[in-house]
Amino acid sequence: MATTTAAVTLTSDLLSDNMSVSTSTTCMKAGTTADGLDMMDMSHLEIASGTNWDLARADNALNKDKANKVYICNNSTDETYYVKITLDATVIGSLYAGDWMFIPWGAEDATADIEIIGYIGTNKISYAYFHEGKTLFEQGDTV
Amino acid sequence: MATTTALISINSTDLLSDELALTTTTTLTKVGTSTGVEYTTGLSRKKVNATAKGSTATTIYTADDFAAIPYLYLKNTNTTVGNKIFIYDDSTSGDPTWLQLDAGDWGFIPMHGDKTLRAYAPNGSDPILEFMVIGTDQ
C-alpha cells in the first residue's frame, strides 16, 4: 500500500491576530482506511492562450465516485497570465500565475471532465492526479 | 498590506520508486496584481444536515459575495470513512457537483466567485464542515 499525504497551511496577518490553519490528509482509496491511492499521473504542460484541453476524464468506470485527488499549479511568472479550470462545463477556478488548487474530485458522471483553458499567454502548468485507476485511450497501432 | 500564504505539501516515500516531495507556496493577491488580499470570512464550522441538494443544504458561499478571485478552503472534519460531504454549484442548471470530501479530506480552490456553493451529506451522518473564504469583499 502506498502512503501519500497532502497537507496545507494557510497563514496570514490580515486579522488583528495572526492566523494559521493547517491540516493534512492521507490519500486513501474510497471506502477504506487501509489501502492508499497507488496510481498517479504527473505532467508539466504549456497551455497557450485560447486553447482548451482535458486534464482528467470522468469515465464512469474506474474513477466514478472514487477518491480522486487533483493538484494543479500555474507556474507562470507573469501575474496577468491565468487559466480557467472547468468541471461539467462550469468554471470552478481561475489560477493566476503562482496559484494552485487541490480538490477531491468525484467524477460523478460522464460530463464531469476537468478541463483547462489558457488566457493572455502560454501558461506553464504542473498537474498531478492521484487515483485508483482510469480507462486508457484505445490504441490504433497493429504490430 | 496583509500577506496571506497558502502552502501545499504532497509527500510519499513509497508511491514511486523514488520519493515524491512536492511543495508549493502561493501568496494570495488581488487579480493580476501583487497586492495582497485583505478580507476573509474567517474560519467557519457548520454541521451539514441536508442529505440531498435543495434549500436545506448548507450555504458555504454566495455568488459574487467576493470579487474574483476568492480563495476557498474546505475540510470535512468527520473521521468515519464514507461520511462524505458533497459540494455543489447551486447557480448552474443541474446543480453540478464540484467536490466529494470524504472524512478528513480537504480542498483549496481559487474560485471564479460567481457561483453559490452549497453542501450536503448523502448518508445523513451530519458531518461538520470547516471552511473559509479569503479575498476581496464587495
Image: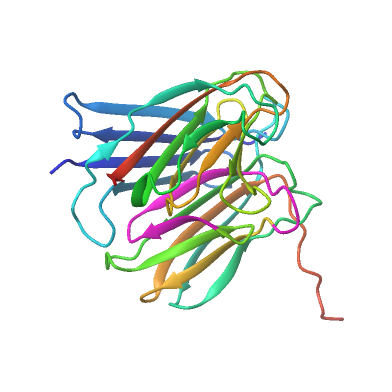
Residue at x 42% of width, y 58% of height: A94
Q: Is residue B79 left or right of residue B122?
A: left
Q: Judge by depth and name the residue closer to the eye, B51 or A65.
A: B51
Give the number of marks.
0
Q: Is residue A71 visible?
A: yes
Q: Judge by depth and name the residue closer to the eye, B19 or A102.
A: A102
Return the x and y of residue A41 as percentages of the image width and height: 60, 56
Q: Is residue B24 visible?
A: no
Q: Judge by depth and name the residue closer to the eye, A35 or A92.
A: A92
Residue A96 in magenta stretch = yes
Residue B6 in magenta stretch = no
Return the x and y of residue B39 as percentages of the image width and height: 25, 39
Does residue A29 sit above or below A94 in this rendering? above
Residue range corresponding to the magenta coloring: A91-111
Quarter of the image with the C terminus of chain A in it: bottom right
Residue at x 81% of width, y 51% of height: A61
Q: Is residue A71 left or right of residue A143?
A: left
Return the x and y of residue A48 as percentages of the image width and height: 45, 77
Return the x and y of residue B80 as percentages of the image width and height: 65, 18
Can you name the residue that lies furthest to the front here? B55
Residue at x 43% of width, y 37% of height: B73
Residue at x 69% of width, y 49% of height: A107
Can you name the residue that lies furthest to the right here? A142
Q: Is residue B98 left or right of residue A58?
A: left
Does residue A97 sit above or below A100 in this rendering? below
Quarter of the image with the N terminus of chain A in it: top right
